[in-house]
Image: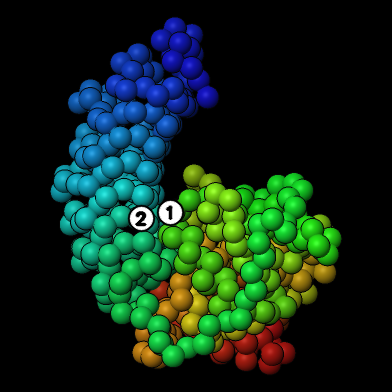
Amino acid sequence: MQTLEEVKSGKIIGITNIKLSEEITSFPTELYQYADTLEVLDLSGNKLSELPSEFTLFKKLRILFLSNNLFELFPSVLAELPILDIVGFKANKIKTISEKAIPKSLRWLILTDNNIEALPRSIGECSSLQKVMLAGNALTTLPDEMAACVHIELLRISANKIEQLPTWLFTLPKLAWLAFSGNPCKELQLDQYSTEPNIKSIPWSSISLEEQIGEGASGTIYKARVTETNEAIAVKIFKGSITSDGFPKDEMDACIHAGVHKNLISVQAVISEHPEGKSGLIFKLIPRNFTNLGLPPNFVTCTRDTFDPFVKINLDGIRKIVYQTALVMEFMHARGIMHGDFYAHNILINEEYTPLLSDFGAATRYSQENKEHSILLQKLDVRAFGCLIDDLLRLQDVSEGDAFEALIQLRNECLDANTCTRPIFKYILERLLSNSI
């Protein structure tokens, strides 16, 4: 991170990446001296509410973050930047986006936690759009023109006011990671007679935190102990009222209803009587020999996971991971739960390649009354499963043999651009048990 004093001095002329966060109230005109080289600009955490018309000088800008500011209008000047492909306005006060405001070059658009009531129809002209973050707004629908955005792979529309999922959503050939909990749409109207899981609660006063062991968009994870029994546990404390995936309460609900499975990090209890009123869940503490299978996407890969270049997995290990993750996904969908964030970075494995699925931040509990619709939702997770197989096949050296070819065939079927002809997990498990894979 740079300081405003550094920027003003001109001593960093030629730099391509600038990050400033000093409660700035107006756009620093000193930034113009970097217009010829600047590719990444992060002005998050300030008090900006507008961009000047001269912002068009930043012709080489590819990535712009203006989160946690005071914007009420999406700046139309951004549409004039020719290669801008990542824009983030998380946690502003944006209510309106004009028809000519969104850059057509965008791959990744972050508008989480604003007051947006409608998207412009012109968003359908963003032919390269892959990742769209819209959770925590006031949207009642999505424009039909978005059906033309056939490269969308990840879509977050949780915590809005959407009354019905558009039918074109299931025609998007690459959509694999969808979150839509916390909306009044009929797909979320669950059976009123369904039984609630019997989950115990443990008061905060009975928990002793030891060390932080993880952190995600929705909360912080600690190693802890139950003071009365000295049992080691993992505790997740949720951060706030909204995350990039939706409401924390929906994540908690999905976690609890997922139940117990050998390949799932299951909830043991909920936390009660937190002194600050925060919500929390208690999980079994996972042994230290479990590590993340993959790493999150970066600016280049956008929607696809990254991996340590030195990690290799033999074919038997891949087959085990594929089978057991299919097993737990079929288990979840039988309970009406779509994971929505099925990635290698949300899977833990040990040296025996036993997978444990985690992170329900984007999970959605959906109604199973409409069987056809339930299957379409499942097939979105199936495409994510196909991406996982594709990633795993790149992590092993031997690219031949019947089992390898069978995995390629299964991957291709799961990545089928036609959602209707894509398999479901029940069929996938039958294939995996047939000894052909």
- Front-most of residues 430 and 345: 345
Residue 129, horizontal then vertical, whole percent: 34, 54
Q: On screen, 143 above or below 195?
A: above
Callout 2 secondary element: loop
- Front-most of residues 93 and 80: 93
- Front-most of residues 83 and 33: 33
Residue displayed at 68% across by 71% down: 268
In the displayed structure image, the side of residue 142 where residue 229 appears, left or right: right
Quadrant of the rendered image containing residue 119: bottom left
- The label shown at residue 242 is 1
Q: Which residue is mark 2?
A: 136
Quadrant assignment for the C terminus: bottom right
In the displayed structure image, the side of residue 357 where residue 15 appears, left or right: left
Residue displayed at 58% across by 77% down: 258
Residue displayed at 29% across by 21% down: 26
- Mark positioned earlier in the residue sequence (1 or 2): 2
Residue 194, horizontal then vertical, whole percent: 47, 88
In the displayed structure image, the side of residue 27 where residue 13 appears, left or right: right
Circles 1 and 2, Cβ within 8 Å, touching? The answer is: yes
